[in-house]
Amino acid sequence: MTHGPQLPKTMKAVVIYGAEDYRLEEAPVPQAGPGEVVIRVDHAGVCASDVKCYTGAHHFWGDEVTPGACEPPIITGHEFAGEVVQLGEGAGEKHGLKIGDMAVSEQIVPCGECRYCQTGRYWLCRESHVYGFRQAVPGSWAEYMKFPAKARNYKLPEGMPRTHSAVVEPLGCSIHAVQRAQIQLGDVVVIAGAGAIGLGMVGVAKLLNPSLLISIDPKDYRLEVAKTLGADLTLNPDKEDVVARVQELTDGYGCDVYIDATGYASSVLPGLLMLRKLGTFVEYGVFREPATIDWTIIGDKKELSVLGAHLAPYCFPLAIDYITRGLVDVSRIVTHELPLEQYEKALHMVHDAKESIKVLLKP
C-alpha cells in the first residue's frame, strides 16, 4: 500500500539529451513502489560536475572505447533535499521516514550485489547509479523525485534551515576527503579550491587541529569565507607563487597534506611540488581534461602517498550532525537561489564563479 496524498500526473523537469542540450520539459511524476520514497524537491544544488557534464567533459560522455557516466535522456541533479510526500509499502519502516519529513539521499544508489557492495564499499558500486546521470535513478532538477528501495536515505532534523540542508551532500564529500588524508595533530595542511566542497574541507580539517591550515583559491571572495571556516592563511595563486610561499612557511620542507578540490588539472603539479617528502596528496576533483605530470616526483624524489576520494560514504550522518551542532559553519556557502526555469543561468554562474559558491535551483 502506498501512503501519502494524490500527486499530480506531470511535473517540470530538466532533462539531459547531450552536452549543452538540456531541456525544461513536462515529465511524469514518479510514484512510490514497495520500499520507495517520493519527495517534493525543496531545492536542488548545482555542482561543478554538473557544469562539466553540461560542457561536454570526457568523463561524462566517453567515447567508443570508454563509456561515459551519463546516460541521456535523464533528469539531471544529484544534490537535493525535499519533503517526503509518498511512501511505498514498507518504505517508512525501512528508511525511518514519514510523510512530511524533510529528507536527503546519498548520491549513489548501490546495487547491493557486486563485490564492492558485498564488502561494504558501496560507494564504488560497479553499477555507478548516481542520481541524475544513470537511467535507473532520475535526478533532482524537477518538482518531484523518487528514492529507490536500495537508496541510502536520511531524515533531516526539524527546523534545520533550508540553506543548511542544501550543504549536507557537499559537506559529506568534504568529510570523506579529509578522512582519506589522515591528518595528524601538528600537520601543515593545504586545501586547494574554495568552492562548496573545498570550504567544507576547511571546516572539517579545522576540527583535527592542524598546526597551519591554508586555503588556496584564485577568488578572493571565496578566501574570505575560508577564513570564517577556520583557515589560518589564505593564498591566491593569481597573485603569488603559492609553492614558494608554502615552502617558506615550512623551513623548506613543504606541507604534510595537500587536498585538491579545484577540479582543474593545473592544480596537481603545484600540489606535488609543495608537499614534503612522504607527504599525502588527496585528489577529490573531477577534471575536464587529463592531468600530465612527472611521476618521478611521486616516487624517486619524494615517496608520496597519492590517494583518491569519491562521493561521501558513511558521511551523511556526520555532515548532518556537524551542521546541526554548528561544528562546521555553512551559513555563507549558499550564495544564490534561482527558479528551475533559470537552470542555464545557474550553470553559467557556477562556471564563471564571479560571485557564487553554492547555487540552488528552486523547482
Image (cartoon, rainbow, N blue to C red):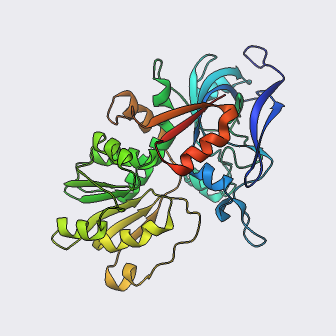
Where, quadrant-wise, is the C terminus in this rendering?
A: top right
Q: Is residue 33 visible?
A: no
User: 86 above or below 345?
Assistant: above
Quadrant location of the N terminus in the rendered image: top right
Q: Nearer the viewer, residue 164 or 270?
A: 270
**Residue situated furthest top in the rendering:** 5
Q: On the image, which quarter does residue 282 sit in?
A: bottom left
Residue in the picture at 78% in, 18% down = 7
Quadrant in which residue 100 is drawn: top right
Rendered residue at 67%/58% (across/down): 126
> x, y percentage for residue 354?
47, 47
Image location (x, y in percent) of residue 281: 38, 66
Residue at coordinates 25% horizontally, 57% vertically from top-left?
184
Residue placed most toward the observer, 235 or 46: 235
178 lies left or right of 336 = left
> Residue 252: where, in percent of width, then height?
19, 74
